[in-house]
Image (tube, helix red, strand yellow):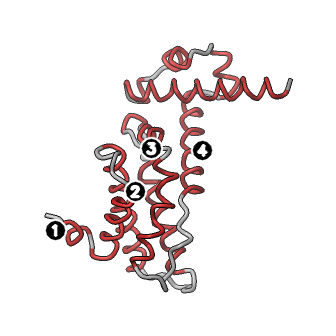
Amino acid sequence: MVAKTDLRVKKTKLMIQQGFTKCINEKTFSKISIQDLTEAMMINKSTFYKYYEDKYDLREKMITETIRNFSERLDVSFINPKQDLKSYEANLPKALLPIFHHREWLKVMWSPNIEVNVFEQMQNIVANKFIIGLYAENSEITAYDQLQANLFAASAMQVLLWWFEIKPTAPVTEIASIITKCLGTGTYYAFVQEK
């Protein structure tokens, strides 16, 4: 009996996520009604309200869960100040693949239609993990350290966005190479040599 209940709950949660995706792909969050959501989710309103107080609670829970998952999947344990860039490039594909496997959902979360800047929140996670990885031994992080982390996170996240939306067939090793070049030489020099 418990297994059947769990399966039904999983199915309902999947329908909710698929319906939310459909609505976000069609219009901005502020223009989406509960009726729109429940129709797209193929559930009745009582089922919706069993899980969520309102559409804002739905969005908040979706974002919170996505950010938590992103942070957990983003394994940057290989980053430390004693390693060279070749080592980063070799280890980066392992860190990128779990994120790539969830790219369709991340594109929904990064959509301007959601009306919350989830992309920026994730960029901050990347910057913080970069700081922790590189400066774990250094108790004092300078303003320049923070700037470097923010610049790296911004370029890495833009590369991910480009990969997901423009070139999803690119091998993970190519993406790792681009991110590593941006880290080592800066974005301008990473691409000026490619042309």
Q: CA distance from mark 3 to mark 2?
A: 13 Å
Say whether residue 172 is left or right of residue 33. Answer: left
Up/down of 73 relative to 153, above or below: above
Identify the residue shown where x is 42% and y is 50%. 119
Say which amino acid is labelled 2: Val
Instruction: Identify the image quadrant of residue 153.
Output: bottom left
Quadrant position of residue 177: bottom left
Q: Which residue in the protein does label 4 denote?
A: 65
Closest to the observer, 169 or 60: 169
In the picture, the disc for residue 103 is 3
The residue lying at 57 percent from left, 85 percent from top is: 137
User: What x and y, as percent, mark residue 69?
Assistant: 58, 50
Crowd band around label 1 with a 10 angstrom C-alpha radius: few (<14), some (14–19), many (20+): few
- Answer whether labels 4 and 3 touch (C-beta < 8 Å): no
Residue 172: give x, y in percent of width and height: 40, 56
**Disc 1 versus disc 3: distance between alpha carbons?**
28 Å
Residue found at the far left of this picture: 195
Query: Percent x, y for residue 149?
Result: 41, 71
Closer to us: mark 2 or mark 1?
Answer: 2
Camera-side residue of 189 and 43: 189
Of the two numbered discs 4 and 1 in the rendering, the one whose residue sits closer to the viewer: 1
Quadrant showing the N terminus? top right
Q: Secondary structure at mark 2?
A: helix
Mark 1 or mark 3: name the one nearer the start of the chain.
3
The disc labelled 4 sits on which kind of residue? Glu
How far apart are the alpha carbons under marks 4 and 3?
15 Å
Query: As shown in the figure, which amino acid type bears the numbered disc 3?
Result: Arg
Which corner quadrant holds the C terminus?
A: bottom left
* Badge 4 or badge 1: first in the primary sequence: 4
